[in-house]
Image: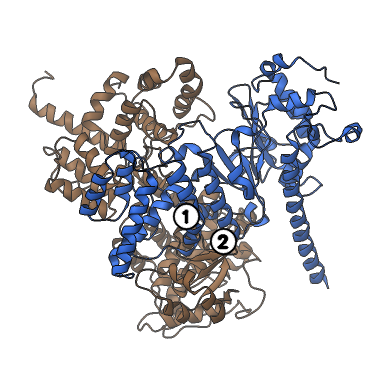
Amino acid sequence: MPVPMPAQGIGHCHSAKSPEVMLAFYRRLFPYKPFFLWLNQEHVPSRLFTHREFAFTLGESTYVRYNSFNNVEDFKKEILRANPTRFEIGPIYNVRPRDRKSVPQHVLRPELRELVFDIDMTDYDEVRTCCSGGNICRRCWGFIAAAVKVLDQSLRDSFGFKHLLWVYSGRRGIHCWISDRHALSLTDDQRRSLVQFLEVVKGGKEVAKKVNVRNGNDIGPLNANIEHALDTIKADFVRIALMDQNCFAEEKGTETLLSLLAVDRDTADSWRRKWSSSGVSSMDKWQEIMSYGAKLMKAGANSAAFRKFSNSTEDLILQYMYPRIDAEVSKRRNHLLKSPFVIHPGTGRVCVPVEVSKVDDFEPTAVPTVGQLLRELDRPAGNPAVKGEDGQDEARKLEHDYERTSLKPYIDLFEKHVTAVMRDNREAKKVVQDSKVSLDF
Amino acid sequence: MFKATSRNPQAGPSSRPGSGLGSNPEVKINRRLSGSGPSSRYPYRLNFYERPPTMDITLEEFEIFAISRLKVLTQIHALLDRSLPPQQYRELLSSTVKQHAALSSNTARNVRLDEERRRDEVGHWVLRLAFCRSPDLREKFIKTESELFRWRFETDDAVEKQEWLKSLRFDWVTVDQAEKSLLLKNLASCLPKNANESQVMGDHYVKVPWYTVPDLVSTRRVYITGGNAYVPQAYQISLVLQAFRERLGKALEMTAKSLPRMDEDDRLMPILSHLSLSFLTNISANDNNFFGEQDPNSEKVTADMVDALAVKHFPACQYNLWRRLKRDRHLKHYGRLQFGLFLKALGLPLDEALVYWRRGYGQTMSDDKFNKEYKYNIRHSYGQEGKRTNYPAKSCQQILTGAQPGAQDSHGCPYRHFAPEQLQQLLVEAYPVIQVGSLELREVMDSVKKTHYHVACTRVFELTHPGNVKKGEGIGGGNMVNHPNEYYNKSLEYEKESKGMAEPMQTD
């Protein structure tokens, strides 16, 4: 039993930078079994696990690639031995990655890989007003939440994927792992095409208008897939960009706004004059823009002027709210991505799964840190801080240590996801077997 | 004479349909026959090359047919690299194909159809043998072959095309009227300009998994729902091409596996090796590789010289990165890569590069952080770390089509990736010769508008080297800029030339 320690000293010795802390985490809290089943999709170790690359970061900067393991026990043993500060998951190769030296160099080739996405807050620096760089707060998380909702909907409804796992990256971003069978076997070309389909906000620092999705036809309709996304984010645009972030309050915001809207110079100038005094909120400006649009519509709902204007407002909403994905991560099978449930070395937070239906209320700063979890473990049984359990339940021996910590709901969520992945995998195998049988006869 | 029959049908049982027409492959055809009307072996102009040819051919034909097809494929490869406007691309392609690999439709007169089609078939199969051996070769072969196929498909007679498609019996699901009217608005939204909903109802749509038509998905030309893409008639070429690529890819791998079994044949192997080698070299001859090997005659570039060189000799892409680094004291990953390799290739040695970058970051970064996180990458790009590859500098092609700049990035090609206003600002700032509102600037911007980025960059070179090249001469001899280092080298060369002329007696 761990010896209870005085409350003051704990904060210091439980930093994610300390190897002892990491080791304690790997020994007592990391969910090996569901982790293995998630990657392997069945109980018996298959190529999905044995031919999979794991890359470890040791200490501050040593990077060890091409680790692979026969089974989850080997994996755990090596994690406890090497005690990495974090590790990443790569593709399934045609050869066990650790045996790669036994074959000619060009033979090693990635074959399968979950389809992954990465959304990073830094890509929102030009639209968020509350923080910048590595910082994130409750307020700018709204952009991520909106992105997650749109991307999740589009991947499920349009592309037909079922098994999406969203994972908070520990600081300022979110990852998505798709474990459907046909997602695993997508080629790089197919991944690239999907990414290009989803890349609506494009262009570097030097481009003001970053949404150009109408194939040069500025009075034409949006592709129906993007139109659906637009419907999803309209409310978020008002709530986040206009009200909470107040994106167009300052002069710079106003100029961006005017440069993106398709209005004649006179109108733009009159707005500029009107809005020059401070204190005109983004919401007020937007309302003015909308009533201008209504006037145009009255003059002719099918007129080119109105279509052009209304399209430019749609593009503007997309530019602020449509997911800005890090395209390079998703395009190729051999890109490594940080595993769920590892500790972010900077913040000490665990990379936990996030439920899409609750993503709006997700509080990145409230995610348990490794220090907090170990403190919870150190707590003597019967501590009133353990929620909802009376004395008798406490006496029951818990199977896993994590069940006593605030990591439990996240692992439960993960296990639920894993069960669904495995069920589908089993059914798919059955179909294959059945068809084999029927061929035999 | 030899019997190809016993050698190359290894190309795969998988590619051989188990039943159906032509189950008797031993049809002997008299190729001296004057060709009017298609024969039973080649009923269509288009060919998926599913059955290996089984007729007798001479060794000479074996080589000649292959070489003339190879000429077409290398030309296609070169054309694809040049990112030409579609019109010009088509014209150039068409003339090469007509010269070396003509195929006429069934209605053509005075053409020996069978002979043409036999040449086509034999050429294709020989090259399969030659190019199945490495993944690189296979990839290039598939890419160029499918481009050739696409051209033929697009130029085929509509009726014949339909019949040929029918003969392939694809298992595409046709979308019925009821489903179409249900999805009417969605389907119409993906049509090109000026199309309307009535067109949807009259069109023949098929429904396929989205990943079978990646090119349509990437350009959002189809509506996607429930994992299916709804493909209108006009785009069904994509499906055919995809099938062509897939089948060819599988067949090539099968061929590669069975190739060792014919190694003992000392008549064919030398021909095949020669063919594959020339395919590879032909391509590398087109690539300008700037690795940064030191030319012993050139003077060493030091970190101190970079700023002076930047102002005089850098193309816009590198000038932008140089000024960004100066201004922001930082570049994102791809920017560092593009600029760093460029500097390496212009002759900045590793130790000077470390000095230059260290200074470039300035006060924004501690020495400790630099040594830990940035030094490695610089050394890596000089081939001193990791797998020790000496990376070449990025060519225009790579810059234009490689990783696209994200919201915070500064790499890429300014002509391609900047908004027009910002590009004009950059050009005016970088090249004092170019004036705001001048005719020349407008000319450059026109090329950009027409997406002729090479042309725009080359024009800027002409404008900034008025004493050395005239309009239309490019960077000399009518060549276009296709590598930032080429731009730099030429610019430097011209400067030396001009200096040499001004002070001819200096060397004495």
Q: Which mark is residue B192?
A: none
Q: In this rendering, does residue A46 appear at all?
A: yes
Quarter of the image containing the C terminus of chain B? top left
**Residue A120 location, x and y as percent?**
51, 39
Tell me: B426 left or right of B280: left
Q: Read off the residue under disc 1.
A: A234
Q: Residue at horizontal 26%, vertical 49%? A: A271
What colour is chain B? brown
B269 or B88, which lies in front?
B88
* Three-letter residue code for mark 1: Lys
- When the figure is inspected, residue A388 is found, relative to residue A160, above or below; the finding is above
Tell me: B32 left or right of A29: left
**Residue B490 location, x and y as percent?**
23, 36
- When the figure is inspected, residue A45 is found, relative to residue B59, above or below; the finding is above
Q: Residue at horizontal 74%, vertical 40%? A: A409
What colour is chain A? blue
Q: Residue at horizontal 65%, vertical 36%? A: A351
Tell me: B395 left or right of A114: left
* Three-letter residue code for mark 2: Ser
B444 or A313, which lies in front?
A313
Secondary structure type for disc 1: helix
- Determine if marks 1 and 2 fall on one subunit: yes
Secondary structure type for disc 2: helix
**Residue B485 location, x and y as percent?**
31, 36
Q: Read off the residue under disc 2.
A: A158
Q: In this rendering, does residue B83 appear at all?
A: no
Q: Kindly identify which chain the residue marked by label 1 belongs to.
A: A
Q: Residues within 10 Å of mark 2 (few under 14, many from 20)?
A: some
Residue contact at pointers 1 and 2, CB within 8 angstroms: no
Q: Residues within 10 Å of mark 1 (few under 14, many from 20)?
A: some
Color encoding of the figure? by chain
